[in-house]
Image: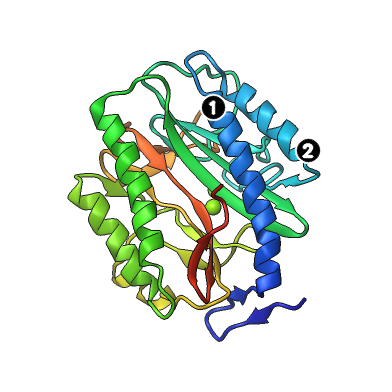
Amino acid sequence: MTTRSTSQKGIILKSTAEIDLMRRAGALVCKVLDHVCALVVPGVTTGELNAEAERLIEDAGAEALFKGVVNPAASFPFPAALCTSVNDEVVHGVPGKRALKEGDVISIDCGVRIERFCGDSARTIAVGSVSSKTADLLRVTRGSLELAIGEMKLGRMWSEVATAIQKQVESAGMSVVREFVGHGIGQEMHEEPKVPNYHDRSQKKSDFCLEEGMTLAVEPMVTLGSCDVMYADADAWAIVTKDGKFAAHFEHTIAMTAGGPVVLTAA
Ligand code: MG
Ligand code: MG
């Protein structure tokens, strides 16, 4: 089994056999997210959710990709298998003693490697009942990922997909986060290319054409207010909205096959 490179910016294309291996990683990520999302109720702590995820990943003989990741802005390596980002936290929330409350939202992101290949997926879910605005945020963000998958046609430029995501989100009066984007994925969690959820002139140079064998983590991050984000000073990992408004994050690992996009992190 060999990997091929395209002329496109160091993007590593995967063979059908490699994509089949990535299905295993994707299926495990899906199983972990199904399991921990079902445990989300008022009172549960983010640390308890992480402990369950770690148990499932270990039982499967897989590697938790986020654990040990080093971030120059943080004083410690990422200590957990899940990122648990609550309310105004967009991504990279560190699991711990925080207990979820009715009306919160939690974004749960999980990445694993098994049989050399990685899977990466995230979902945002409501804790108990939430405001209609919050419910809209989850619906629009999930919908923007579904829209993106529908738009991912072989031969199409990514900027067309990104523009569609951005239009859908902004027409709902919400914003797309710029500072964090999706990515290629394979034997490494982060490969080329960068996969943004918006498009402007600054993105032109890094645009790419969707090709058979590409495996991409597509992950729109959407906010109810402005798109500006910053580090929360609490733990130096979590990224929060500057205006304190809620954020949501949905992610799938997707393979471009001869038959079109295949979601590897869905049941
Ligand atoms: Mg992720
Ligand atoms: Mg990702």
Q: How many marks?
A: 2
Determine which of the numbered discs, if any, sits on residue 58 in the image: 2
Left or right, 224 with respect to 149, comes to left
* Helix, strand or loop for disc 2: helix
Q: Is the residue marked 1 within 8 Å of ligand 1, measured from its CB?
A: no
Q: Residue at x 40, y 68 (%)?
A: 152
Q: In the picture shown, does residue 37 fall above or below 109? A: above
Q: In the picture shown, does residue 181 fall above or below 225? A: below
Q: Residue at x 24, y 28 (%)?
A: 132
Left or right, 115 with respect to 109, comes to right
Q: Is the residue marked 2 within 8 Å of ligand 1, measured from its CB?
A: no
Determine which of the numbered discs, if any, sits on residue 38 in the image: 1
* Residue 90 percent coordinates (x, y): 43, 39
Left or right, 189 with respect to 211, comes to right
Q: Residue at x 45, y 56 (%)?
A: 181
Q: Residue furthest bottom?
A: 7
Q: Residue furthest top?
A: 43
Pick whichever, 258 or 4, lies toward us: 258
The crowding category of the residue bearing disc 1, from other C-alpha atoms within 10 Å (few below 14, some 14 to 19, many at least 20), is few
Left or right, 109 with respect to 125, comes to right
The amino acid type of the residue labelled 2 equals: Glu
